[in-house]
Image: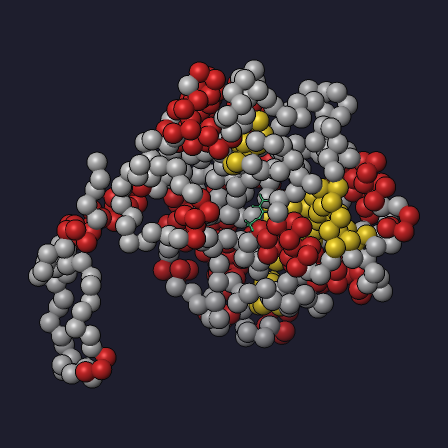
């Protein structure tokens, strides 16, 4: 049933607030600043409360159900992190506050820098990038500058596998370098012979580096990672790791030790800071010794105990200060504005500790493999064998083909929309691009076996409906506040004034 919108509830003279009597003299506003008509609804307090609570309930959220959106890691965000981020002494800090007055916050950022370095095996970390894509941008700018400083400005090609996230090639282009796309082999892995070919002959001296996602966007760990890294580095290129999928590696594999030169973390994916809706993010970057002087800044430095008093610009007792690395690529934004994200990631890492993080990774990988196996038979699992012909295990996410040979009119999007009727958020659709009709599923580590079983049951039921009653899928969703939208138009022509449940035809 359609709910009344708040304007329908308006009645002249109704009011939801009682303003206190003014304690300053009344003044008259200039006529030209006043208008006769201000079309705001006049409603009581309870009506306003119900309006906004109802709106909040129209949203699907991780607090209301399983959110298997692959590549996005929509993991549970512990509420204690939210409490920490709202502590007045931290929440009300200004990014430009005098360092002497925010040593505690700087200590926290410093510890986070160190922990992220430890988790990934990198020597130095900058927290400044505001998103994964900005971390990539920082990484490629550092790689570019590294080659320029070594007198090799002709190194302008970044190799990017065809399974890469769209931000990878976009980053390369924005940084003024050239993308050379690499095909995957029949097993979905980096095609080693194509890679070696790209790193040979004339091309070799133009190789600036390679961007690689690990595990890949297919959810697959690259079995030949050492050979891949060697092929690029042996001709003078640097290796960039897109670390968006650290949920499958944390406390088990250190990319820095594998030989990567640089990577970004998505704190808003792996380290449980909330995301979605374009809110704040954090795409911290880690680097090894080759790139540490180029990091974007400023970064927090802890003064050695001995020179605390002598060299600290901020006065005695100030152990932390801001430093620009000597050859820094510069600032990426008005710095530290997303400090709340750092705080949540800090709380998350601190609460789990190393052994806890390892358990997170193990459960993320276990849950994904369990779900994948329960769907076997009902869904096609692309790249089901390694190039060596071995049985495939996935990382923290996996791809299924969201289409069936015996249900030709049904597409991945129909399956996803039908899943909404079963009470689940859909997985990622049509990504990675190299799998037609891809559904990328990431259950995350915090779901119980019971809930994974319910999701599998729903997916199996939908597969059967696709064959026997495909119209159910074409009509879906039927239980959501709105029916199937033209997504491109919905994003461009938002209906902001009519947001309540009005099932459309
Ligand atoms: C999410 C993601 C990115 C981009 O990160 P943002 O924080 O959204 O900018 C890059 N690569 C992969 C594989 C991702 O999943």
Query: Which is nearer the eye, 88 or 63?
Result: 63
Q: Quadrant of the C terminus?
A: top left
For image coordinates 72% across by 20% down, the residue present is 390
Residue 247 in view (yes/no):
no
The image quadrant that residue 219 belongs to is: top right
**Residue 154 image point, x, y percent:** 83, 60
Residue 106's spot in the image, x, y percent?
52, 62
Residue in the foreground of this view, choosing between 499 and 105: 499
Is residue 211 at all visible to an observer of this figure?
A: yes
In this rendering, position of residue 63 left or right of residue 246? left
Frontmost residue, 104 versus 323: 323
**Way the structure is coloured:** secondary structure
Give me the residue at 42% from left, 19% from top: 469
Residue at image position (63%, 73%) is: 311
Residue at the farthest left position: 13
Relative to residue 455, is residue 145 drawn left or right? right
Q: In which quadrant of the rendered image does the N terminus lie?
A: top left
Q: Residue at x 86, y 41 (%)?
A: 197
Q: For residue 173, which quarter of the picture?
A: bottom right
Reply above or below: 137 against 57.
Answer: below
Residue 14: quarter of image: bottom left
Tell which residue pokes out farthest to the right in this image.
201
Q: Position of residue 61 (x, y in %)?
A: 38, 39
Rendered location of residue 195, percent (x, y): 81, 40
Q: Nearer the viewer, residue 347 or 387?
A: 387
Question: Is 325 above or below relative to 111?
Answer: below
Position of residue 412 in the picture relative to residue 78 (left or right): right
Q: How many marks?
A: 0
């Amino acid at each position: 049933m359609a709910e009344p919108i708040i304007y329908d509830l308006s009645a002249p003279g109704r009011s939801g607030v009682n303003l206190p009597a003014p304690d300053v003299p009344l003044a008259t506003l200039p006529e030209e600043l006043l208008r006769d008509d201000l079309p705001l609804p006049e409603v009581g307090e309870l009506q306003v409360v119900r309006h906004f609570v109802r709106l909040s309930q129209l949203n699907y959220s991780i607090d209301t159900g399983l959110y298997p959106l692959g590549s996005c890691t929509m993991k549970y965000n512990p509420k204690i992190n939210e409490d920490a981020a709202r502590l007045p002494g931290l929440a009300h800090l200004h990014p430009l506050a005098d360092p002497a007055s925010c040593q505690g916050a700087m200590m926290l950022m410093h510890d986070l820098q160190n922990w992220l370095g430890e988790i990934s095996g990198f020597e130095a970390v900058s927290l400044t990038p505001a998103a994964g894509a900005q971390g990539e941008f920082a990484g490629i700018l550092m790689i570019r500058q590294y080659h320029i400083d070594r007198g090799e400005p002709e190194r302008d090609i970044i190799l990017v596998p065809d399974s890469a996230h769209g931000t990878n090639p976009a980053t390369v282009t924005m940084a003024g370098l050239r993308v050379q796309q690499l095909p995957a082999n029949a097993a979905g892995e980096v095609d080693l012979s194509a890679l070696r070919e790209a790193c040979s002959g004339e091309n070799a001296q133009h190789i600036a580096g390679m961007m690689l996602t690990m595990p890949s966007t297919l959810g697959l760990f690259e079995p030949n990672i050492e050979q891949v890294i060697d092929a690029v580095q042996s001709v003078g290129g640097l290796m960039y790791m897109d670390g968006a999928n650290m949920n499958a590696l944390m406390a088990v594999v250190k990319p820095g030790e594998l030989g990567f030169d640089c990577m970004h973390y998505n704190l808003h994916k792996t380290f449980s800071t909330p995301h979605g809706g374009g809110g704040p993010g954090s795409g911290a970057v880690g680097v090894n010794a080759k790139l540490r002087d180029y990091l974007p800044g400023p970064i927090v430095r802890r003064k050695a105990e001995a020179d605390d008093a002598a060299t600290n610009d901020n006065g005695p007792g100030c152990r932390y200060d801001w430093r620009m690395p000597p050859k820094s690529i510069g600032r990426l934004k008005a710095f530290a504005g997303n400090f709340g994200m750092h705080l949540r990631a800090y709380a998350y890492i601190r609460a789990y500790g190393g052994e806890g993080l390892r358990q997170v990774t193990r459960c993320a990988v276990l849950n994904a493999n369990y779900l994948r196996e329960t769907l076997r038979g009902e869904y096609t699992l692309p790249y089901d064998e390694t190039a060596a012909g071995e049985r495939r295990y996935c990382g923290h996410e996996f791809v299924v083909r969201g289409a069936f040979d015996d249900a030709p009119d049904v597409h991945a999007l129909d399956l996803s929309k039908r899943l909404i009727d079963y009470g689940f958020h859909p997985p990622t659709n049509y990504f990675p691009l190299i799998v037609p009709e891809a559904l990328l599923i990431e259950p995350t580590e915090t779901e119980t076996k019971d809930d994974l079983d319910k999701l599998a049951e729903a997916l199996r039921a939908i597969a059967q409906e696709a064959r026997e009653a495909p119209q159910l899928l074409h009509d879906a969703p039927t239980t959501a506040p709105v029916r199937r939208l033209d997504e491109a138009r919905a994003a461009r022509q938002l209906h902001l004034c009519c947001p309540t449940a009005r099932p459309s035809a």
